[in-house]
Amino acid sequence: MSRAAAVVRRVPAPLALLLVVVAIFGTAWVVLVPPWGGPDEDSHFAYAQTLGELGRLPGGAGLAVSGQQRNSMDFVNSDATVIFHYAKPTWSGATERRWRIADRLADRRNGGGGNAAAAYPPAYYLIESLPYRALGKTDVMTDLYVMRLVSALWLLVATVGAWLLAGEVFGRNRALQLVTAASVGLWPMVAFVCGVLNPDAMLIGLSSLTTWLGVSLLRRGPSAARAIALALCIGLALATKATALAWLPPLAFAMAITAWRLRRRISVRRVLAVAAVVLAFALPVGAWVSYAHDHGRTAYAQATLVGSAPTSAGTTGSTSGNGGVRQFASYLWQFYLPKLPFQHPKIHFVDPHISTFPVFHVWLASGWASFGWVNVWFGTWVYYLFLAIAILIVAGAAITAVKAWPWRIRRAPWLAPTAFMALFAVSLLGGLHRTDFHMYLDNDPPFLQGRYLLPIAPILALFVAQATRALPRRWRPAGAGAVLAGLVVFQLACLGLILYRYYDV
């Protein structure tokens, strides 16, 4: 007990206070988002319930969701609520009494069939199956909300990871660490994703720790403990979601740099450390790949999809071959820049709720505030306010870069850590765009959503903190305070949007 108390006392006071605030907001998201109101939350719960009840992964015999879950979804009107903007969750005292009777009679073991999440790796669902099993034969709503609370713990992990990352980048600067960590923990989209059942929550938390560990390893020099922890985090992320494949290039880069630095200091101890690093990575990944192979599953279905040829004849008017380099380049250009007159066909990326300009609609608008099943939005003018704030952040960070010129590249200790973070961001974006492009060729609906960028939230948060350094020194505390206050107001506004959308408040 004294050791635990000592660990708690070592937590810096600003971080401790921030974690309390983040926990409060995270719990608010858990409670206020209606049942099954997160993206594919019905499928994610069904996956964990299948593990808890049947001891296997979904995709075999059985219904897509259990009778118990289907029964609760019908009582709260979840299907209509997540699809139609005018529909509300249905609940009353009389409805609850009828549901409780039906819940006791419903079958919780007849699920286990295929659903939207059935092909995902199992790490997140294995963790969520633990509280499910611990609760015993309780009602499905209790299961759902307790499991959401467990998922919300990843929000705290992501916040701590961002604090530690800022400590590596800015040193022991509590103001900048606080701004960086708050920009992650109080980012409403991060809180929303972590507050419902979704493996992105675990991926965001692990990515925050991984970014810190990679930067620390490259900045401080070789360390067996950091290398093992880095490999383990990435291995667990790869057992969580296929998106984590974007961590493979940064992992290879970090290990190559570390090996180069140790090239003249080979010893038995360091060979054993290398073996431990490989083992830490291989255990979670190897367990999942072996299980998938033995049970006729595809370990990373998304990667297989991207690597295969398009299944349809391609897009109408294609002049450069299905999936060719020229067509992919045209796709990227039209995503980030206005279409040129000679580019054909015009690519339709999104349902333009906010804008027809894809980079604005997808990365900024839906990345800042798009809740429910990507169908709960503020008014359009709010997203132009977000755009103005984003421009100010980029401008502030750019000003600090100009002030720091000339950069001493060869002696800069931040060069390798910066390359590590940039490599992850580029790998993540590349994989997401390649998947979206492939689905476009197959005439499938648009794939990209702003929440898919949240694994790089700690990196983006560094820009927010860096932008405050563009202010005169005497104004910087006020600037940091303005960021923190703005994040709290932003959280309250987004929670208000949820209340308005679902509860007529």
Image (cartoon, grey):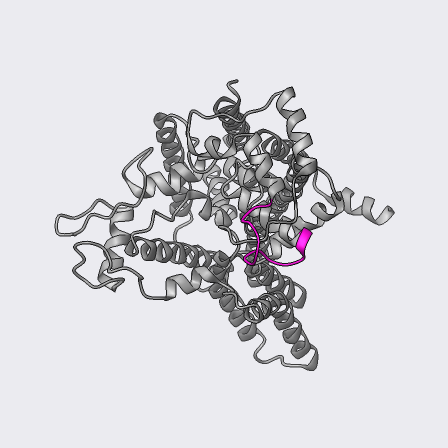
Residue 187 is situated, as x and y percent measured from the top left of the image, at: 52, 37
Residue 243 is situated, as x and y percent measured from the top left of the image, at: 48, 56
Q: Is residue 25 above or below residue 244?
A: above
Question: Magenta stretch: residue 392 in it?
Answer: no
Horizontal side, residue 128 vs residue 402: left or right = right
Extreme residue in the front direction:
105
Residue 385 is situated, as x and y percent measured from the top left of the image, at: 38, 29
Residue 269 is situated, as x and y percent measured from the top left of the image, at: 70, 78
Question: Magenta stretch: residue 59 in it?
Answer: yes
Q: Is residue 201 visible?
A: no
Tell which of 436 and 78 is nearer to you. Answer: 78
Q: Which residues are magenta?
A: 52-66
Q: Is residue 376 above or below residue 181?
A: above
Horizontal side, residue 418 vs residue 162: left or right = left
Q: Is residue 231 above or below residue 452?
A: below
The quadrant where residue 422 appears: bottom left
Q: Residue at x 38, y 44 (%)?
A: 398
Tell which of 308 and 273 is nearer to you. Answer: 308
Q: Is residue 405 visible?
A: yes
Predominant SS of the magenta segment? loop
Horizontal side, residue 311 vs residue 504: left or right = left
Tell which of 93 and 234 is nearer to you. Answer: 93
